[in-house]
Image (cartoon, rainbow, N blue to C red):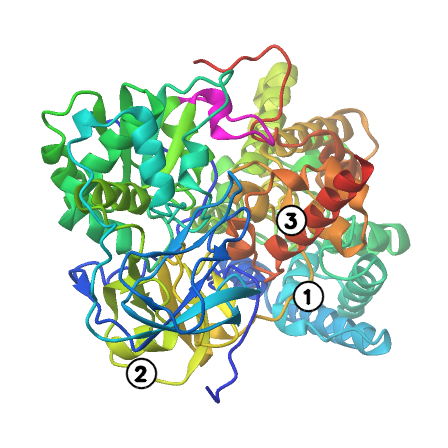
């Protein structure tokens, strides 16, 4: 199929992917210390299963929760538990973390065993494997995967969309995974299709990655029900509702989840990791991270162990090229700026972006000139400048009336604003207020 | 680590366009017509444009200083207002008329309401209306016929209306600007080049100019087809449609709203020209539509993605 899929609105920021798009994934060395947060996902945090002084091995479960919406965490190196304490994580909060000193041996835990042939696994087996492996959405949202794959009975799913859009500038981790691990992508896709009981999966890739499209088309030639679709390169094509609308024509209702229209969207990194879990039995302890930006000496796509500190990852890329201005977990459009480089890589860390002082400068805001560019750019068709005004005036009703809660926080409005107004930030503030108020009203 | 990292909310990159770059685009687009005005109307056109621009910028500076607001004269918006106001003056107008107009446009129409983006009327047009009401003989009298170099107040539209006597100019003269009129409105071709540049650059959208001029054309065709070229080329329509009606702050945000605005302005223009007291109606019709803009924006909103429209079902 050569039809190109897209959506209305959106923006075309400079891609800045040339730093790393042709750099093959490199297996990163194990750092001396890993800091593994007990909560790397949306949902209940884990309780530690180890105590200070314990020795652990690679792939050993070290944290778990009874709650359904939660996933366990595993040791990414072998060594000794040094501390269990609160540390800052890329989300900005302080979270209980298990700090392990590596013994350098990378001894694998005996529980890590290949899961056998996919044909022999039942739907329930796959769901339990995915949960036990600690799978959470690796695109950045970190929602527990097994929960997404267990929709209520009244929401039948018929389509799986594998999200290989990677529409964030700079990031190339998913691109490299598709090029180098197409077998894992296909295995993961088949496993998730089986877990969901669907016959149709689309692997959705932006057309700025023709090589990935080609590789995966070849890989899926003989696979029933898996189709690779080429989407127009435009930000935020990788947003799940944009993908669903572009590829299937279905409109996820306001405030609803993809399952309302029979769809599940999973990031391609998550899918490939699920493929790896089935194949090798190794839980989610490593991920591909694009370490990039003008202030990094040798930008790379690193296969990093979860818990590796940002500063160690940057050191593995030759260190800082110049004084860093901003360190971002994720991409430049939706990533979170860090206040220190001593935060760990977590399951949702798709990139470590280091901008120099000049690029990091926060622009001075001026008057809104009512040019309408934010309205044009909004992929949800909001009027960002209006909500901005309501938010500034603390007029929560006004912001609600203009559907602030439908904002997907893609940042397209702030990006295009010629007056440099932090529109997305103000909308987020209003959105939070509205949601808190709704909760209170209940 | 010792270095202080900058923390701010996403996005961490911004587009290239700034208020200043947009205003600069408008200025660039006005340069051809500006050159033509000097070519056709001589030195006094230079005096008027300079007086107008300088007083607009100075007024903006003084207002902001006085009101303790950040000084934003570098955003070039006052320069644009200054040029546009000068474009609305007859060639023989005295320099102080330009100063009065610019000061009014910036101080009363723009800054008192909160500055850039908060004005509800187009500053240059509101100032033109102010000058018309205060010094109407200066505003309508001192036009120059570039062909004869004689002072004349017989614009194509006033001849058409019968309020002035004279011979209607040729189509070609109207197209290149060899007709009496205010200094910026006469050369259709150069204004078009500027307008198309703005559309090409994405500074303005095509909707308002096309629907505005289209509406005027359709009404002219229906009522008296022979007057069509004079209605399109003989007055301020091209200047108004591309440079005045497209002003961000005073025209609707959405595409649908822009259509309503442009069609409304077109109808009003023709009503004024055909049955009103003035031979020309572009500036008053744009001002009237400016006033309606907040209402249009209130009722014409984009339909938010995924919000139920009633009756429309998802295909599944």
For mark 2, name the chain.
A
Q: Residue A377, image x and y in percent? A: 51, 44
Q: Position of residue A172 (x, y in %)?
A: 27, 56
Displayed quadrant of residue A353: bottom left
**From this viewpoint, is residue A229 visible?**
no
Judged by depth in the image, the label closer to the viewer, 2 or 1, is 2
Q: Which mark is residue A321?
A: 2
Rate crowding at label 2 as few (under 14), some (14 to 19) or many (20 or more) other CA atoms within 10 Å.
Answer: some
Q: Regarding mark 1 in the picture, which secondary structure is present there?
A: helix
Magenta segment includes A190: no
Quick one: quadrant of the C terminus of chain A?
top right
Q: Earlier in the sequence, mark 3 or mark 1?
A: 1
In the rendered view, does A352 fall on the left or right side of B8?
left
Q: Residues at marks 3 and 1, common chain?
A: yes
Identify the mark at residue B248; answer none if there is no mark.
3
| Magenta part of the chain | A249-262
Determine whether label 2 and label 3 are within 8 Å by CB.
no
Please tell me the numbered disc located at residue B78.
1
């Amino acid at each position: 199929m050569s039809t190109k899929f897209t959506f209305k609105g959106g923006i075309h920021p400079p891609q800045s992917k040339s730093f790393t798009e042709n750099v093959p994934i490199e297996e990163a060395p194990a750092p001396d210390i890993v800091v593994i947060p007990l909560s790397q996902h949306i949902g209940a945090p884990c309780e530690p299963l180890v105590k200070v002084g314990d020795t652990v091995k690679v792939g050993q479960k070290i944290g778990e929760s009874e709650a359904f919406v939660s996933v366990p965490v595993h040791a990414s190196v072998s060594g000794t538990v040094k501390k269990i304490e609160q540390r800052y994580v890329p989300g900005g909060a302080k979270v209980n973390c298990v700090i392990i000193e590596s013994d350098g041996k990378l001894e694998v835990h005996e529980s890590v065993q290949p899961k056998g042939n996919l044909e022999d696994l039942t739907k329930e087996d796959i769901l339990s494997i995915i949960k036990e492996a600690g799978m959470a959405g690796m695109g950045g949202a970190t929602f527990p995967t097994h929960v997404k794959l267990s929709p209520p009975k009244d929401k039948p799913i018929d389509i799986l969309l594998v999200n290989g859009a990677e529409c964030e500038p700079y990031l190339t981790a998913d691109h490299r995974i598709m090029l180098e691990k197409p077998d894992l992508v296909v295995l993961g896709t088949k496993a998730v299709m089986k877990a969901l009981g669907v016959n149709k999966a689309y692997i959705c890739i932006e057309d700025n990655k023709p090589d990935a499209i080609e590789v995966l088309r070849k890989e899926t030639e003989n696979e029933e029900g898996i189709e690779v679709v080429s989407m127009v390169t435009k930000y935020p094509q990788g947003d799940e509702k944009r993908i669903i609308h572009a590829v299937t024509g279905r409109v996820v209702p306001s405030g609803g989840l993809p399952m309302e229209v029979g769809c599940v969207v999973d990031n391609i990194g998550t899918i490939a990791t699920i493929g790896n879990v089935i194949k090798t039995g190794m839980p989610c302890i490593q991920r591909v991270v694009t370490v990039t930006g003008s202030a990094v000496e040798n930008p790379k796509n690193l296969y990093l162990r979860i818990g590796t500190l940002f500063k160690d990852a940057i050191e593995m890329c030759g260190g800082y090229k110049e004084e860093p201005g901003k360190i971002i977990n994720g991409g430049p459009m939706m990533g979170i700026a860090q206040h220190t480089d001593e935060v760990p890589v977590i399951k949702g860390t798709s990139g470590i972006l280091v901008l120099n002082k000049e690029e990091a400068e926060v622009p001075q805001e001026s008057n809104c000139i009512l040019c309408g560019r934010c309205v044009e750019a909004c992929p949800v068709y909001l009027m960002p400048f209006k909500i901005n005004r309501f938010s500034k005036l603390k007029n929560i009703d006004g912001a609600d009336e203009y559907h602030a809660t439908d904002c997907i926080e893609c940042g397209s409005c702030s990006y295009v604003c010629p007056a440099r107004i932090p529109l997305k930030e103000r909308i987020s503030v209003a959105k939070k207020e509205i949601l808190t108020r709704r909760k209170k009203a209940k | 680590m010792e270095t202080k990292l900058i923390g701010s909310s996403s996005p961490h990159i911004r587009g290239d366009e700034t208020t200043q770059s947009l205003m600069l685009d408008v200025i660039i687009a006005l340069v051809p017509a500006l050159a033509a005005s000097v070519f056709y109307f001589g030195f006094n056109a230079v005096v008027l444009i300079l007086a107008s621009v300088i007083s607009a910028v100075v007024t903006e500076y003084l207002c902001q200083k006085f009101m303790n607001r950040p000084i934003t004269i570098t955003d070039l918006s006052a320069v644009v207002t200054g040029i546009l106001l000068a474009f609305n003056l007859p060639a023989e107008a005295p320099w102080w008329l330009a100063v009065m107009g610019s000061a009014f446009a910036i101080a009363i129409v723009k800054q008192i309401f909160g500055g850039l983006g908060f004005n509800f009327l187009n500053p240059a047009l509101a100032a033109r209306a102010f000058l018309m009401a205060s010094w109407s003989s200066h505003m309508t009298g001192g036009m120059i016929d570039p062909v004869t170099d004689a002072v004349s107040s017989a614009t194509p539209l006033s001849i058409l209306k019968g309020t002035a006597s004279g011979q209607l100019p040729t189509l070609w003269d109207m197209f290149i600007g060899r007709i009496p009129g205010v200094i910026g409105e006469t050369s259709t071709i150069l204004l078009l080049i500027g307008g198309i540049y703005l559309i090409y650059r994405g500074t303005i959208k095509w909707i308002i100019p096309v629907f505005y001029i289209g509406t005027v054309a359709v009404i002219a065709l229906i009522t008296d087809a022979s007057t069509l070229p004079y209605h399109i080329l003989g007055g301020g329509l091209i200047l108004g449609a591309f440079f005045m009606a497209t002003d961000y702050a005073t025209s609707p945000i959405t595409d649908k709203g822009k259509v309503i605005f442009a069609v409304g302005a077109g109808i009003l223009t023709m009503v004024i020209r055909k049955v009103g007291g003035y031979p020309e109606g572009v500036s008053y019709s744009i001002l009237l539509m400016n006033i309606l803009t907040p209402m249009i924006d209130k009722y014409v909103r984009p339909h938010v993605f995924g919000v139920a429209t009633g009756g429309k079902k998802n295909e599944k």
